[in-house]
Each structure stands twice: as C-alpha cells, then as structure tokens.
Amino acid sequence: GQDDLITRGNGTVAVPAKLYGYYERFWPRKGHWSFYGNVNYAAEGLAGPTHGAVQFDLNPTYFVNDNLSFYAELNGTHNPDWLLWRGGNLLGTFKADTLQLNGGMQWTISAKQELRIKLETIALNARALQAWRVAPNGTPVASNDPVSDFSLRNLGFQIRYKYELAPLSDFYIAYVRGGFGFNEFSQNVGGLLGDAFKLRDTEQFFVKLSYRFEL
C-alpha cells in the first residue's frame, strides 16, 4: 500500500502488506474479582507481515464491596520493526520494548462523597536498526543517516476527593504528581519503569469549587 501520513507531508511511502490479529477475553465480576485481558499482533513496518509487534494487556479488578474497588493493569509490547518519522523524508526502524503499569482505587464513600486514586506509568526503550530515505517514487531506500537509540519514561499520579454540595455543584480536593524523562540512548525497559516512580517534575495540591447558579 501507500502510506501518506507517516512523513508528515514529505512524500508518500510504499509499504508492504500489513497483518493484524486480536483476541480479548472478559470475565465479569464473580465474588470479589473481575478480569479483562487481550493479546494482539500488528505488522506495520517495512519488514512485512512476519515481523509484527506482539502486545499483551492484563487488567484485574478486586471489589472489596459494591462501593470500593481496586484495579491494576500491566501492558507490554515488543516491536521488532517500529517505523518512525525522523524529519523531512527520513524514516527510522527501531527494535522497541514498552511496559505500562497502571492502577487505582475508586471508593464511593456515600451518595455525596467519592475518593479516587489513579496511577499511570510508561517505559519505552527503542534501539535503532536502520535509517531510510523516501525516494520520489515512494520507495524506502536504506541510508547511512544517523538514527539514534532512545528511551523514555513517564509518570502520572492523582488522588482526588469529591463532595457534591448540590446537583451539578461539587467541591474537589486533589493531589497531582507527574514527570517525564527522555534519554538519547538505550536502557533496560524494566529499569526505566522502576525509575518512572522517582519522577517529580510537577507536584500540585489544589482545591476547586464548582457551583451551579440559576437566574
């Protein structure tokens, strides 16, 4: 096919056939537990259908009762042929690994009170394989242009309390912490995920009042 999006307006790229496969399963709540999971395969790079990314997602939820629940999510991807735009008509293929760990709590304290905790972390490591220049006819041509390894990590954490003063009128108290780290070199994805918990680029505590008036 022809990919007219990846170069951001710098030419159309001739790409091989793509292949996708997806399976998911959901076990509804039984007792204290529910579970959702999926696995998928997506071949979208230049190496063809046999070099696709394999991804899994596991998401269990534990219900203490109808008002209090905890959830966790582990998502991982291995992509041996990740195709990225590097500027102009330059593309790069990378061998990439990604881990994502999410979790949280939802507690309905009463009809008017709610407490939520939410955590999101991402770690990604990409090792450069090959640089490509897009020819006028759209063919990717192997190039000696420098394409660097890179790695990144990200953290988002929030605790939020909500109290309903009246219909459509709410009072909030929240603590929010986040951060982002980027390196121009390869790093073990497991270590990156652990380092994500140390990020503290932003840290905020705020109070918000939302009140509905009728005239």
Image: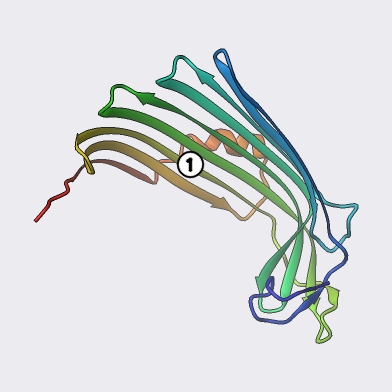
Q: Is residue 92 above or below residue 50?
A: below
Residue in the foreground of this view, choosing between 197 and 185: 197
Name the image quarter holding the C terminus. Answer: bottom left
**In the displayed structure image, the side of residue 153 where residue 21 appears, left or right:** right
Farthest front residue?
Answer: 215
Residue in the foreground of this view, choosing between 153 and 36: 36
| Residue displayed at 28% across by 22% down | 110
Instruction: Please provide percent x and percent y for residue 156.
Output: 45, 41
Q: Secondary structure at mark 1?
A: strand
Instruction: Please provide percent x and percent y for residue 198.
Output: 46, 35
| Residue displayed at 88% across by 56% down | 49
**In the displayed structure image, the side of residue 159 where residue 58 appears, left or right:** right
**In the displayed structure image, the side of residue 135 where residue 99 appears, left or right:** left
Q: Is residue 92 above or below residue 198?
A: below
Q: Quadrant of residue 27?
A: top right
Residue occupied by mark 1? 155
